[in-house]
Amino acid sequence: MPWEAKREGSKGSVLMLMQGLREKNRLPVLVVLHQERSSPGRVGQMLLDKGFPLDIRRPVLGDRLPSTLADHSGAVIFGGPMSANDPEPFIRDEIDWIGVPLKEDKPYLGICLGAQMMVRHLGGKVEAHRDGLTEIGWYPLRSTEHGRLLMPWPRMVYHFHREGFELPHGAKLLAEGDVYPNQAIRYGDNAWGLQFHAELTRAMMQRWVVHGEDRFVMPNAQKGQQHLEGRMIFDQPLKEWLSGFLDQVFCRRDRTKAGTMDRQSALQPG
């Protein structure tokens, strides 16, 4: 399946990847990536399967983000090797832009860097562990009461980061970990942040293990073989969880609308 959105002209405009179940007539999900060869991976695959076209943009390469999400179902900002604290203009611009989905109450999902950017937008801090510990590999996850009321959660998840985020004012903690306590958060009804990575396909993980080998010597990081062995044990529950989680983020309004229409139909005279 072709992931790369085609670029046209010097402005780097993006053609939408218009695949999926068109009969559902869903607006595209805006996908923000941070490297030329980055992929939305399993998240992209699942969104297409659920009927959402993808509008893929890379601000780091010059793509502009829309001033409104009126023509989108929501947005996902993925991770990257940069920090939410970096001074580069595109980092600051993306952090500021997150105000668009928040103001318009459109679904927003931040993954790793994307979650940290949301926390920065909300006034929270993003910083390294006080003892320099990382999470690179598979680590335990525990749902909070808020998380358990929402859905079942996997017990092990995959990480590749050396910074974490604090819980911003007004956000709910959905899941926690041992080294970096804030692993999944929700702000309001429609903004979500994940510190871990559920989107990796097998090919993506293999690339990360090869290209990220220099990070395996960092404190608390796992060796590459542990990444691949852990995938064989823990990936299937993580994959199943991700599909249900994306339903929570992007399809809840469909279910609510359908339920309202059913109730209205039941009240109509026969």
Image: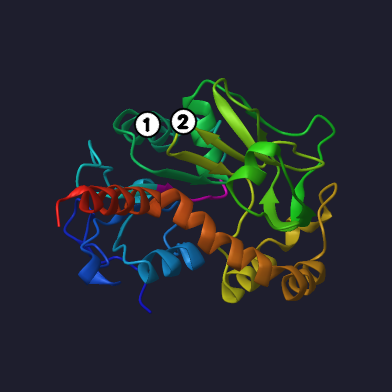
| Residue at image location 65% in from the left, 73% down from the top | 206
- Quarter of the picture holding the C terminus: bottom left
In the displayed structure, 4 sits above or below 94; it is: below
- Quarter of the picture holding the N terminus: bottom left
Quick one: SS at disc 2? Answer: loop
Crowding near the residue tagged with mark 1, few <14, some 14–19, many ≥20 C-alpha atoms within 10 Å: some
Majority secondary structure in the magenta region: loop
The total of numbered circles placed on residues is 2
Residue 22 has which mark? none
- Three-letter residue code for mark 2: Gly
Residue 20 painted magenta? no
Is 42 positioned to the left or the right of 8 in the image? right
Question: For mark 1, what is the residue?
Answer: 102
Coordinates of residue 134 in the picture (x, y in percent)? 77, 45
Question: For mark 2, what is the residue?
Answer: 188
| Residue at image location 83% in from the left, 54% down from the top | 217
Residues at discs 1 and 2 in contact (Cβ within 8 Å): yes
Quick one: SS at disc 1? Answer: helix
- Three-letter residue code for mark 1: Leu
In the displayed structure, 157 sits above or below 24; it is: above
Coordinates of residue 90 in the picture (x, y in percent)? 39, 37
Which of the 4 image quadrants contains residue 70?
top left
Question: How far separated are the C-alphas under marks 1 and 2?
Answer: 9 Å
Magenta span: 76-82
| Residue at image location 65% in from the left, 64% down from the top | 238
Task: Check the image and name the residue furthest to the front.
Answer: 270
Is 74 positioned to the left or the right of 122 in the image? left
